[in-house]
Amino acid sequence: MTKTLPFLFILLIACSPQQGEKQSFGTSSIQHATGFHIETRTDGRYLVVDKPWPNANVTKSYKLTKPFTRVVCTSTSHLPYFEMLGKSEAVVGFPNLKYISSETFVELGKIDKITDLGADGNMNLELLIGLQPDAVIAFDMGGESATLDKIAEAGIPVIYNADFLESTPLGRAEWIKFFGALLNEEKKADSIFNSIQSAYDRLTDMTADVRKRPTVLTGVVYGDTWFMPGGRNSAALFYEHAGADYLWADDSTSGWLELNYEAVFERAQQADFWIGTASFDSKKALAAGDHRYQDFAPFRADKVYNYTKKKGPNGGYDYFESAYARPDLVLADLIKILHPDLLPHYQTVYYEQLR
Amino acid sequence: MIRQHFDTSISKWRLVFVGLAVALVLVFLLSIALGSVRIPISHTFHFLIGQPLENAGWQSILINFRLPKALTAVLVGAALGLSGLQMQTLFRNPVAGPFILGVSSGAGLGVALVIFLGFSFGVYFGIPDLARDWLLVVSAALGSFLVLSVVGLAAIRIRNSVSLLIIGLMFGSTISAVVSIMQYFSQAENIQAYVIWSFGSLGSLSWGELQVLAPVVIFGCLLSFALSKRLNALLLGDNYATSLGLNLKTTRLLIIVNTSLLAGSVTAFCGPIAFVGLAIPHLARMLFNTSNHLLLTPLVILLGAVAMLIFDIIAQLPGSDAVLPINAVTSLLGAPFVIWLVLRRNNLHYSFDQ
Amino acid sequence: MSLLHTHDLAIGYGKKTLSAGLNLVIEPGQLIGLIGQNGVGKSTLMRTLCGFQAALSGEVFIGEKAIKSIPASELAKKISVVLTEKPGAQNLTVLELISLGRHPYSGWLGQLREADVAAMERAFEQCQIHYLLEKRLHQLSDGQLQKVMIARALAQDTDLIVLDEPTSHLDLRNKVEVLELLKHVSTTGKSVLISTHEITLAAKVCDTFWGMDFGQPIAIDLPDNMIRSGQVKQLLHLQEGVL
């Protein structure tokens, strides 16, 4: 008897979770995003950005040690994640505050909690370095940036955010976990994303068996060229999940198509819906842009919608700031437009009908 | 003996013009028949003789897309060609053209002012379409006129053609900078309208806008004919021209007004279109070996129209859904031509360098 | 009635007076040679007499009218010029160039009428350049080009033709041909004023020399007199024995 007790005790201790393991909160399984992941190495946990910029052939690994409490962001699309994670005050610097739509951040800017760093391409580096932030969350389009190099030289970590390279809506939104890892809010990030994901999936299920899929046209013409999202583009996926028949779904690219206006006219003149009209926010504006827009059936039938409903205090469209983080809301908006009977009580957040 | 020579001349030129006119008609018809959407020739033919088509989509494409675009191409080619011709003679420089001398930038400034100020005062969409179109033409022409006047004034003092080009380029840059500043202070909608304009496009004119552009260009062509005699006198140089009785100041003013009108109005509606104004006059001079403006004016009109139609057909990438921006096509074909031109300067025999 | 006369004319640029108190007369049918060193003001005088440049003071009269009051299009029927500068567009044909001489007379689109064609024929005749009709300017030799430029001025059918150093780039034979052509022109009733450095050749054809020197009134005399009296030597500051 005296011999089993110590044995049981040792067994008990042996079986209980390690002290070390108990510290790692979040799940490191990233299901939709392909641009980053979190891995545990011998010397600690790392946030790895697999493709820091388009056509990159290197990865960037960032060791997760101290959580960041003071960061500089470089894109309005980063800000919603901070807000959702309750870490708005962690943003101490941002280029061009006047582009921000979020009221929270605008207020913070007004009381000088966020330093305006000037135009994006030519940020005031002196101010930035003077802030001594824990890191700069940056994005780059080509892998070479003199500005970012200078910041790194000054000893400030540059963290590449490549969320814009994701090709699915959920993949893009999952980058909340990227921020969660950096701000030590992984658990919160997980739970927020899970609820977004389940909402999104529920919505997708709702439209899976819909009887009729209305046809959808999107975009506007620039000069003689109509820029149309490809069939595998994020935008196209939204339409598919919203129960629509996107007229260029047969295309297999995930980028943008440059189409001839008359080709678009032939295919889409009788479309049921026209969703997404760049900066045009009224039928009058649209008609002034090109008189032939008036010949499209959705224009005549008042079925033109644009993401111009929500504006920030500075006049910018909130869609470009917060929509990427809330694909569930975007999808709900689209379903409300395309199949209003499925969401009778829902009010659209971003999209409005053009009048 | 001179009479004999004139007679043979006239019959030769008659042939040339008839030939060019026929070519123009053919290319015009071709540009209507070809496009991304495959419309059978028989249907196009029926459309042209006035029979309505059963396929409403095709009818719409022919009448709202292809026909206006073809007409626009004709107007643009003629107007830009003529303005380039006159600028080259006025400034005695073979590398003069609406783009290079900053005239297109001037037009851009005029357009930008209308768009940005119109938006600021909230009236942009309130103005009736016709009024807005005329406003655009006038302000673009004024912008071009402003630039040309400054460059023209400089031309009186500065003999050196290279200096003149530099002034034109610098002016163009300054104006672009001013426009950028305007964009910086504007909202997304205005910027979008301006950016769309700056791509350059032949296809965006409505029939109403054509009804404004066509008379302006036709007037400019007629004025160009009337100015041919003066332009010919200028070929000999300022001193000889004066000795022939030419009032230099009036002549310069008329040419500048005409050129601004032609280049400005086209740029207002179609955005800046590169190389056409520069290359077409040279093509005309080289192909037909003449410097006589009385002949060059109709030659440039016809050649310019034909060339622009051909560029447009290429840009449409007929049969495929894709499309090339018109400026890409004119630049792709125009730039090598200009380079070759500059390299060949010594053999041009009309370099005008004194 | 003299073709051209000046009254107390002063010529120069801005503050600089090159010559003043000029009372010159050009009669119909004269061939006048304007001689003097470079920089003395020959070109300025010619430009002022043609109306290209404003006089500093005094008047130039064409017939009875002050030159200032004659519109350019009318003046073009009175005075034509041949300058040292090459015409810019070298790919013009000779015929086109000559027809430009009819600018003051031709129709508003440049149409040439009977009278215009006749004048051009005469010009071709006088200069003996029919064989050059279809050639381009850049294909001509210096001598041919000069004759063509003179033909253009002749086609302009003016009472006075002013030529700035018409023989300067030519070889001896062409110099002689040009001067003889100009002499012939002056016998048809037109007046010709040339500036030149070819003293010996010019002396043979000119009726009068106008000699310009710094700070001196213009000397007007028969060429032979001027040469014999040594005045030409003085004007040109030449060594003894050159002439």
Image (cartoon, coloured by chain):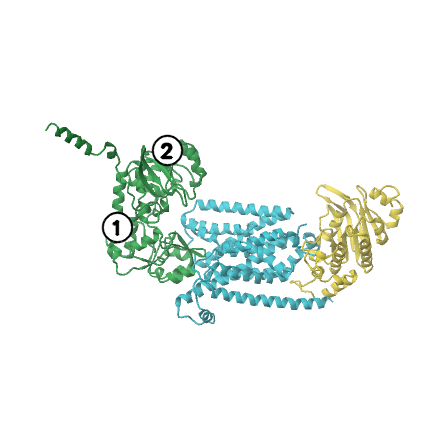
Residue wearing tag 2: A133
In the image, residue A316 lies at what x, y percent? 37, 46
Q: Residue at x 88, y 43 (%)?
A: C241
Which amino acid type is marked by label 1? Asp
Q: Are marks 2 and 1 on the same chain?
A: yes
Q: Point out the tag, 2 or 1, that comes first from the N-terminus.
A: 2
Left or right side of A234 for B201: right
Name the residue nearer the viewer: A139 or B243: A139
Circle 1 SS class: helix
Q: Let me know if residue A315 appears in the view.
A: no
Q: Quadrant of residue B86?
A: bottom right
Find the distance from the CA under tag 2 to the CA under tag 1. 38 Å
Name the side, left or right, on which C14 lies relative to A127.
right
Picture coordinates of residue B153, whole percent (x, y): 61, 48
Quadrant (top left/top right/bottom left/bottom right) for the C terminus of chain A? bottom left
Q: Is residue C179 left or right of residue B46?
A: right
Say the numbered circle drawn on residue A201.
1
> Which circle, 2 or 1, is nearer the viewer?
1
Q: Which mark is residue A183?
A: none
Q: Which chain is yellow?
A: C
Q: Position of residue C201 (x, y in %)?
A: 84, 51
Extreme residue in the right direction: C228
Question: Is residue B306 shown to the viewer in this render?
Answer: yes
Q: How many marks?
A: 2
Label 2–label 1 contact, CB within 8 A: no
Q: Which chain: green?
A: A
